Each structure stands twice: as C-alpha cells, then as structure tokens.
Image (tube, rainbow, N blue to C red):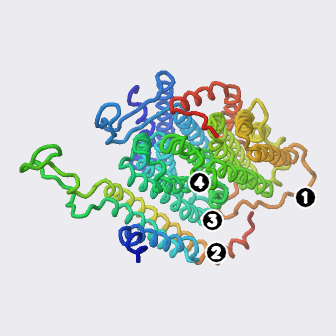
C-alpha cells in the first residue's frame, strides 16, 4: 500500500458498506465476513500509515493528486489528508475498537436486530468510515460532511434498539443537528475572513493578515467550540447522551461510547492547535474580562463533578457508565485547555486510554446483559462465581477507570493532575481526585455485591426494557464475545506499561505543531 | 437612523439568517410536537444555507461559468478574466452538500417520528414522556 495507505483507512469501510448493500442483502451470512475484512484492511492501512509517520514525520496525502497552487506555501485547492502521531493514534484507536466490536457483534446483532443484519453492518461500516475520515482530513468542510455521515449513521444505529431508543435517538438528532450546524456556521465565518478551507491555510491566512482580533474569527471560534461541545456531550450540553447510549443495542453502545465522544475531543484539539493556534486559544483577550482557558477549565471541573455525582445515583449499569463518560469528557476538555504541554499530552493520552477503558466496560456489561438478561446493579449479586473471567475483565476496566497502576487510567490521570498543578488550576486537580474517589465508590459497591453475594429473595424481575429483548439468557459466554473483552482488558495494561512511549509520540507531534507553553 | 444605515441595511442578509435561525432553534427546543420540532430543524438548516449562499454573492457579478476560450489568465477580447465579475461558486457548491445532508437528516428524523408514533400512539412529547414514566424502567 505504502503511499496510498491513508486513503485506504477511509475507503475500506466505505466500500465494505457498499459491498454489503450489493451482496450482503442476498447472502446474509456474508455480512460479518465482509465487515471484518473491511475493518482488518482499514486497521492494516492504519498501522502502515502510523509506521510511516513514526519514520518520517507528518504524512500528507493529496486526494486526487490536486497539488497546492505553488509548491510549498501556496494555498491548496484539493482536499488534503494529514496524519501526524496524534491523529495516527486516534486512527489506531478507531480501527482497533471497531474491529474488536465487530468480532463481538457476531451473536449480538442477530439477537438484537434479527431481520436487519445487513443494514446494521452497512451503517456500522459507514460510521467507522465517517469517524476515521473526520480524524484524518485536513479540510474544514470535508470534516463537516464526514461529521454528518457519522452522525446520521449513529442516529440510525441507536434507533434500532429498544422501544425507548427511538425517542432518545430523536433527541440526539435534534441536539446533533444543532451541534453540526453550529460547526458549519463557524466554518462559514472562517471562510468569509480567510477564503480558504484547508485547516493549515486558514491558520496561515489568519496569522499573515493579523486577523486574530477580528470579531468574525472570535465568533467562528465560539461557534465551532459550541458545536463540538454539543457533539461530545460536554456537561451542560450532555442531555442527549445517557439515554441514547443506554437504550441502544449492545453493539452500538460498545462502538459509539468509546469512539464518538473521543473523536469529537480530538476535533476540538485539532481546532485549537491547527486552525486557531495555541497562541489564539490560550492568550488572554484584551477587552474581555474572562480568560478563555480559565473559563473552560472551570466548566470542565464542574462537568467532572457533576458527571461523577450523577453516575453514583444510577442503579443501572449502562446508565452509570454513560454518566462516567460525561465525567471523562470533562477530564479531556480540561486537560486540553490547561494551556501547558503536559495538559495537552495528558488529554491526548487520555483519549486513547479512555477509549479502551470505556470499550472494556461496555463489552463486559454487554456480556453481563447477555448472560443475566438485565443490567441493574442489584442483578450482579454473586456474579464473580457465575462468570469469573468476565468479571475479572470488568474489574481491570473498573480499576483503570478509578486510576490504579499499572492500568493506563492511572497514567493518564497522573499526567492530567500534574498538568493541573503546573497550571495552578487547583479546582481541576480537586475535581479529578474527587472523580477518582467517586469512581472507586461506584465500582467497589459493584465488586462487593458481585463478590460477596447477599442472601436475598430472587432479584426483582428484569428491568431492561422487556419488549425489546426477548430476554433469552445465554448459558455460556460465546468466545466471540469473550475474546474481544479480554483483548481490550489486556490492552489497558499494555497501554499503561508503554505509557512513556505513547507520551513521547504525542510530544513529538506537539513539537512539530509548534507547541510552546503559552506564557501567563 | 444611523443604526439602520450602518448595521441593518448593509448587512441585511446576516440579520435575516440570524432571525430565521432563531425561529428554527426555538421551534426545535420549545415545541411539544415532534413534527413541529422537525419543521424547526428544517428552518434552522435552511437559514445556514441562506447564509452561505449570500456570502458568495457579489454585486453586479455574473454566474460563475467561463467560456472555454476564457480560461483564467488568458486574454479574451483584450481583457483578462476579472474575478470580481463572477459570483463565488465555492460556497454555493458547499451548500449542495449541506442540502443533501439536511434532506437525509430530515428523512431519517421523519422515519423515527413514525416509529415513535407506532410505539406510543402520539407525537406530543409530554404525552410520550408521561407514558414512559409509567413503564418499569430506570
């Protein structure tokens, strides 16, 4: 593949979806093999691209060979794909997670949506194509189109779930459209001022013409931030997320929860770093009483505390996890806005580790639902005895969420706390520690129940939406579910052990993006 | 009067798009009926399309189609192609994509509202929510 690898990352799932449309609808048995093949190809291309990036730095791919007007500094007229180590890491996460969830889905999709298997896999592949494209593209409008592709498919993937899922998907459509439209509007304002759509070029034009003080650019930055915040469920804008993820089919939740919010956080970082520039993002604005970075870090502290408290009050495992995601979004937004290199590094590292923690926990909960037919915390009574391996993987995921070494959750939290101290944002540090304690309470409550079964009269009947799932419980965990779960659990430890390498990769990308600790 | 001359009249396209967008947004957030919410969503998206279309317009400009013997940089009848004579096609082309996205979103959301109607027998949000409260769920 070599030089063409970046395009294969996006095209493999896209053409896989088309192939299912032609072949899979007639031969249902071929849907899963096609999906797995497309995702494996995408993963191989991602690995190849990432190796190239490590060897020789940023990898620029010109779609259709449209060269820049003048070699070097001219503006680009075509769409560019640009991979550095940060986007390479996010692409690796997307490819790996989607492949693992596809393996996991073998029995689940047939059980959840028996008559719509081909359509489900088509949407699944399109969602992966959209997410990968968003990460890799360097064109602001192209990003909008791919954002809408991934949103549209995720609305549909959620809506095929239980009875309640349709209404939550509908709310997600409303919120998601507002978010994407804000993003589009922001790009419009940038285009008015700069006349270009390539992210690097937008930044170059802003710098060259000294447009940073222009109200249009200010409006554009606010609109784009609001758009991505809605899409990533940043705390006051989070209302769509818990229902959408918890009522969706198991596979959808396991695919979307690790990926969608993390990719949006990557987009936010991309906008801060590449389009507006760190100088613009972190500098105090003359004439504005608030310091942007202080404001956002305060908001994210509130998000962390609120997410943790709401998670503690839930009795349903899936719901609880969705609120933990909201708290985790606060970690990453806060880390990115701490205005120092450590914080940005920690935020990117947390994108990677949080994706796998969420994946591990969602897969484990999926297995628990498949085995016990419900997802209430009360239903976990004595579960260690019934399914020790699944619960062991769940424990690794939970410990990583709490932040115990040697799991990656500890190291990402370590970097974020260190960055918070360095920046003097004590409320952020406090919120991080508070959230770790909350997670400990949440998960040890579950461990206690699952490890030391209480003698209770039969657990109350399943509350997991009776009319959507014919609650057939499996006697044995199928290996197609157990293997991805264990791979994700082991990945958590591997990521933790190799955290230094990963952080070095991230730091090298931040250097090539001209990161400097913004003074003051 | 000065306010009108300086802020409203030269920038009327922005005013119109903001007003339309706010109408749409209010409908999306405040209306009770799901289909009314979707109508609001359509207005919201159309407002943004209007914004983009209006920024490509130039006064006295022509449609952006060049004769084949009028390639940029070449001399035609003694005059090179003047960019100011043509409307900016790029925002308009971008909006073709945005229109398609809007139609797809609307279609998907209408299909969902149909499914909601089948499940709950109503499209009024508070009726649906009161039905959900009765269900044994978290």
Q: What residue occupies the far left of the structure in this picture? A: B77
Secondary element at image label 3: helix
Q: Residue at x 66, y 25 (%)?
A: A500
Q: Position of residue A216 (x, y in %)?
A: 45, 56
Asked if labels 3 and 1 share a chain, the reply is yes
Q: Residue at x 44, y 53 (%)?
A: A187
| Mark 3 / mark 4, whichever is N-terminal | 3
For the N terminus of chain A, give its image quadrant: top left
Asked if labels 3 and 4 share a chain, the reply is yes
Residue carrying label 3: A163
Q: Nearer the viewer, mark 3 or mark 4?
A: 4
> Which dot marks residue A457?
1
Distance CA(mark 4)–CA(mark 2): 28 Å
Residue carrying label 2: B128
Asked if labels 2 and 3 share a chain, the reply is no
Asked if labels 1 and 4 share a chain, the reply is yes
| Mark 1 / mark 4, whichever is N-terminal | 4
Q: Nearer the viewer, mark 2 or mark 1?
A: 2
Q: Position of residue B52 (x, y in %)?
A: 37, 60
Relative depth, front residue between A331 and A390: A331
Q: Position of residue A240 (x, y in %)?
A: 62, 60
The chain carrying label 4 is A
Left or right: residue B65 compared with residue A100? left
Left or right: residue A57 compared with residue B90? right
| Mark 3 / mark 1, whichever is N-terminal | 3
Distance CA(mark 2)–CA(mark 1): 34 Å
């Amino acid at each position: 593949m070599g030089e063409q690898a970046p395009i294969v990352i996006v095209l493999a799932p896209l053409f896989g979806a088309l192939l299912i449309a032609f072949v899979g609808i007639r031969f249902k048995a071929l849907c899963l093999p096609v999906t797995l093949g497309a995702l494996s190809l995408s993963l191989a291309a991602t690995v190849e691209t990432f190796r190239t990036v490590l060897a020789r730095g940023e990898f620029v791919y010109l779609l259709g060979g449209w060269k820049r007007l003048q070699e070097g500094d001219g503006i680009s007229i075509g769409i560019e794909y640009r991979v550095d180590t940060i986007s390479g890491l996010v692409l690796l996460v997307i490819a790996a997670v989607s492949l693992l969830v596809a393996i996991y889905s073998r029995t689940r999709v047939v059980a959840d949506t028996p008559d719509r298997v081909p359509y489900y896999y088509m949407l699944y592949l399109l969602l992966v194509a959209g997410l990968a494209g968003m990460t890799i593209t360097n064109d602001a409008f192209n990003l909008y189109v791919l954002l809408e592709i991934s949103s549209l498919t995720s609305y549909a993937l959620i809506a095929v779930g239980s009875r309640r899922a349709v209404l939550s998907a509908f709310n997600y459509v409303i919120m998601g459209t507002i978010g994407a439209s804000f993003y589009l509007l922001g790009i419009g304002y940038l285009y008015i001022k700069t006349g270009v759509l390539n992210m690097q070029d937008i930044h170059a034009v802003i710098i060259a013409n000294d447009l940073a003080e222009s109200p249009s650019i200010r409006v554009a930055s606010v609109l784009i931030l609001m758009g991505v915040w809605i899409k990533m469920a940043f705390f006051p804008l989070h209302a769509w997320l818990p229902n959408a993820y918890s009522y969706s089919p198991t596979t959808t939740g396991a695919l979307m929860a690790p990926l969608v919010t993390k990719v949006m956080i990557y987009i936010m970082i991309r906008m801060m770093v590449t389009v507006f520039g760190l100088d613009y993002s972190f500098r105090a604005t003359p004439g504005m009483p608030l310091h942007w970075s202080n404001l956002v870090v305060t908001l994210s502290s509130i998000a962390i505390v609120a997410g943790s408290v709401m998670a503690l009050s839930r009795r349903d495992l899936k719901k609880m996890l969705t609120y933990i995601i909201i708290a985790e979004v606060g970690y990453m937004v806060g880390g990115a806005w701490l205005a120092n290199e450590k914080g940005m590094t920690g935020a990117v590292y947390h994108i990677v580790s949080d994706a796998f923690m969420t994946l591990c926990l969602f897969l484990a909960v999926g297995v628990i639902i498949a085995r016990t037919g419900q997802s209430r915390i009360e239903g976990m009574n004595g579960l260690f005895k019934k399914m020790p391996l699944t619960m062991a993987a769940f424990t690794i995921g939970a410990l990583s969420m709490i932040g115990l070494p040697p799991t990656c959750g500890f190291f990402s939290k370590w970097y974020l706390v260190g960055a918070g101290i360095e920046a003097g944002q004590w409320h952020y540090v406090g919120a991080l520690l508070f959230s770790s304690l909350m997670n400990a309470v949440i998960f040890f409550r579950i461990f206690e129940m699952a490890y030391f079964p209480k003698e209770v009269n039969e657990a109350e009947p399943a509350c997991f939406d009776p009319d959507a799932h014919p609650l057939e419980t499996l006697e044995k965990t199928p290996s197609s579910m157990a293997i991805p779960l264990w791979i994700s659990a082991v990945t958590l430890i591997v990521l933790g052990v190799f955290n230094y390498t990963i952080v070095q990769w991230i730091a090298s990308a931040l250097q090539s993006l001209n990161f400097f600790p913004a003074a003051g | 009067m000065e306010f009108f001359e300086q802020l409203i009249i030269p920038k009327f396209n922005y005013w119109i798009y903001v007003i339309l967008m706010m109408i749409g947004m209010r409908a999306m957030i405040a209306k009770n009926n799901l289909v009314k919410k979707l109508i609001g969503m359509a207005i919201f998206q159309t407002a943004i399309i209007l914004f983009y279309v209006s920024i490509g317009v130039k006064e006295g400009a022509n449609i952006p189609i060049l004769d084949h013997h009028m390639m940029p940089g070449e001399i035609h009848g003694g005059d090179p192609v003047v960019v100011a004579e043509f409307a900016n096609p790029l925002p308009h082309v971008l909006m073709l994509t945005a229109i398609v996205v809007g139609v797809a979103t609307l279609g998907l959301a209408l299909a969902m509202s149909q499914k909601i109607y089948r499940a709950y027998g109503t499209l009024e949000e508070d009726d649906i929510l009161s039905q959900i409260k009765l269900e044994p769920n978290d």
